Image (cartoon, coloured by chain):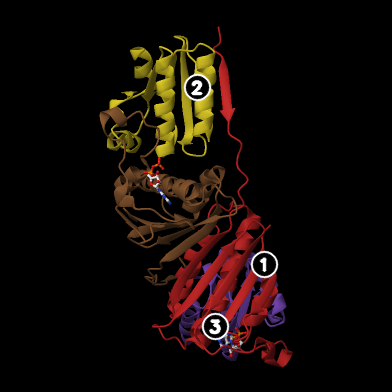
Chain colours: A yellow, B purple, C brown, D red
Amino acid sequence: MGFTATKDKGGVMVIQVDGQLIVGNRQELKQLVQEAVDHGEKKFLVDFAKAGYIDSSGLGALVSISKKVREQGGELRLAGLNEDLRSLFELTKLDTLFAISDSAEKALIAF
Amino acid sequence: MGFTATKDKGGVMVIQVDGQLIVGNRQELKQLVQEAVDHGEKKFLVDFAKAGYIDSSGLGALVSISKKVREQGGELRLAGLNEDLRSLFELTKLDTLFAISDSAEKALIAF
Amino acid sequence: MTSPLRLVVRRTSDVDLPVEVSTRIPSVLDAVHESVEVLARHAFAGLPTSPECERLRNRLKTLLCEALANAIVYGHREDPAKFVAVRIEVETTLVRVHVTDEGPGFDPSAVRPPLDPADLEQETGRGLLMIQRLADDVSFNPQGNSICMTLRRP
Amino acid sequence: MTSPLRLVVRRTSDVDLPVEVSTRIPSVLDAVHESVEVLARHAFAGLPTSPECERLRNRLKTLLCEALANAIVYGHREDPAKFVAVRIEVETTLVRVHVTDEGPGFDPSAVRPPLDPADLEQETGRGLLMIQRLADDVSFNPQGNSICMTLRRP
Ligand SMILES: Nc1ncnc2c1ncn2[C@@H]1O[C@H](COP(=O)(O)OP(=O)(O)O)[C@@H](O)[C@H]1O
Ligand SMILES: Nc1ncnc2c1ncn2[C@@H]1O[C@H](COP(=O)(O)OP(=O)(O)O)[C@@H](O)[C@H]1O
């Protein structure tokens, strides 16, 4: 349980969600992104390839960081959602709010 | 869960206890031995090398079959008891009633 | 000369044993993750590790997160001295999850999730919606402080 | 040029969550084995597969066999319509197993196991003795129809 942040060659902060994004760890994600934004980072990719489950607090955290990134003129993308995780975005209509790519590779090309 | 009976070259019925010897399957063991005794078998070895747990009903079944075998002039030995299973025989003093060998091999030599 | 082999295999008794797993969780959001993992482990002990079961397990975990967070935040205002009661009934064909708090309860039919395009940037309000869509059945006690979420097993 | 790497590892919350596993078993001796396996699986979910834990698991199974057989035979005279209630409390340092029947109960202090050399050929009467020696603690309710067996965890 945790997040791994790596800056790729194209300057994108790739944040990997390890296990779950839920009420118990969403603050860490928000903090991580806030610090990176403060540091001048503009491009963010949240990769769910290694995530098993997320809850509505986790979705809320994503809404919050995407707002923050956009306010700074940056861009946030999501990737690696399996069928079940993706359906959470659909049923909450958040799929219309986020740029979602199938894989981290595809998302990185899209930036 | 069950018993495998094999007759070895020396004419010993080797009965392997698979998993457990408890209230739920001791009748099968008693029946197996009864049939073999009726068939004229005299030498029995019950091997616990693959047994995980036994209960007092299982011990009772062993007392019963050992009596039956002895009444027919036969011999019953036990083998393959791990430390915990062996301690059950000690605390019930049944270690004084049974011929217990460390392994099936040693028991077969002792017949 | 081969030795005669006899195999006695016991009939497996078809016991359909419903098991209940229950616990009480302190009202601390930091306890949610560990509690969810422990509960899922005990409730689904022996469930195969097939992808299908893994999905069911994750669905259960999301549902538990939602219901626990609501009980802790709205039911108990994060008072660590209050405990959320969780009871999971595991049957052959379904799993029933009861989450009960000591709070005043609420009227779930009055909740409106932020589904309008104008509301999508709201951070909260999606918990019940997710519960209703992830569970195969949802019911509340009359007071509204105890939720029962049913999952059909694959 | 290496890319900067940042790792955020969350503090693991030290939740010490006592879990209870419970069920009701029909009073049929053929149901004992399956019930014991199911209960041990749920109660010890997540317990490592070390030899030490395997021994604890087997000890629990033997204890459950004894208490269930007694409840079924003496408490319920094998009436399949009567159910034996089992409740297992799993805590960090111990496991407590409660087995309760609807029978008249008995006085455990009056039981004399067949330990005399002359009595060793008796087939029965060793259940309580085994329970008392395998469990780290044993107690009964006043009526004698509910036993509590405690195991310390390694
Ligand atoms: N256990 C509860 N006790 C009291 N009120 C609750 C409870 N669960 C939910 N609610 C109410 O229902 C509303 C909607 O909850 P929910 O859909 O989970 O979204 P969120 O928790 O993000 O606000 C909450 O704002 C709260 O007023
Ligand atoms: N749950 C119970 N209800 C009533 N009597 C019981 C119960 N458990 C044990 N007993 C009594 O205690 C005696 C000893 O039990 P035990 O030591 O387990 O040996 P066994 O079951 O082989 O007779 C039994 O014969 C029975 O009279």
Chain designation of label 1: B
Q: Amino acid at mark 2?
A: Val
Q: Secondary structure at mark 2?
A: helix
Query: How far across and down, in percent of the image, does residue C135 sit?
Result: 32, 50
Q: Amino acid at mark 3?
A: Asn
Query: How far across and down, in percent of the image, does residue A11 sit?
Result: 46, 10
Please give the residue where the numbered disc 1 appears in the rendered image: B84
Residue C27 in the figure: left or right of residue D109: left
The residue located at (63%, 76%) in the rendering is B77
Q: Is residue D81 above or below residue A92?
A: below
The residue located at (67%, 75%) in the rendering is D138
Residue D85 in the figure: left or right of residue A104: right
Are dots 1 and 3 in contact, CB under 8 Å? no
C-alpha separation, residue under disc 3 versus residue under disc 2 = 61 Å
Please give the residue where the numbered disc 2 appears in the rendered image: A33
Q: Is residue D2 above or below residue A76?
A: above
Q: Are marks 1 and 2 on the same chain?
A: no
Chain designation of label 3: D
Please give the residue where the numbered disc 3 appears in the rendered image: D70
